[in-house]
Amino acid sequence: MRKILTFVIIFNSLLFASNNGDSDHERKIRIEKQLKIEMEKEKKYSREQTFYSTEYYDFKGAEVNEESLKSIPDLEIDDLDMDSVYD
C-alpha cells in the first residue's frame, strides 16, 4: 500500500512539474513579445519627442493582454468588517 501511495505522489509531482515548465516558457515568450512592442513605442516617442493629444494617442496599445490574464490566479476576497479594524 505504501509503495502505491509513494508511486502516486511521485507521479503527480512529476506531472505538476512538467506543467509548470510549459507555462513558464510561454510566460517568458509573452513577456519578451510585449517588451519588444513597448521598446518600439519608446523609440518612436523618443524620436518624435511630442506629447500626444487624445485624438492621436494609441489607446489600443494600452489595453491588457488577455493571454496574460489566464495565468493570474483567482484571489479570495475576505469581507471587510470595519468594526474589527478599530479594535
Image: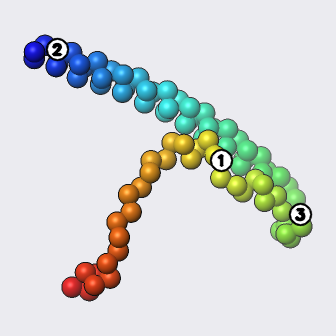
Quarter in which the C terminus is drawn? bottom left
Residue at left offset 41%, top offset 23%: 18
**Picture quadrant where residue 49 is located:** bottom right
Q: Are marks 1 and 2 in contact (CB under 8 Å)?
A: no
- Where is residue 82 shown, x and y percent of the image? 32, 82
Identify the amino acid type marked 1: Asn
Is 50 displayed left or right of 71 in the figure? right
Residue that numbered label 2 is attached to: 4
Amino acid residing under circle 2: Ile
| Numbered label attached to residue 65 | 1
User: CB of mark 1 within 8 Å of CB of mark 3?
Assistant: no
Please report whichever mark, 1 or 3, sits nearer to the chain's N-terminal start.
3
- Vertical arrangement, residue 12 with respect to residue 72, above or below: above
The quadrant the N terminus occupies is: top left
Asked whether residue 50 is in view, the answer is: no
Q: Nearer the viewer, mark 2 or mark 3?
A: 2
Q: Decide if residue 15 is on the left or right side of residue 71.
A: left
- 73 sits to left or right of 83: right
- Decide which of 6, 51 is in the foreground and name it: 6
The 10 Å Cα crowd at callout 1, few under 14, some 14 to 19, many 20 or more, is: few
Mark 3 Cα within 10 Å, few/some/many (few <14, many 20+)? few
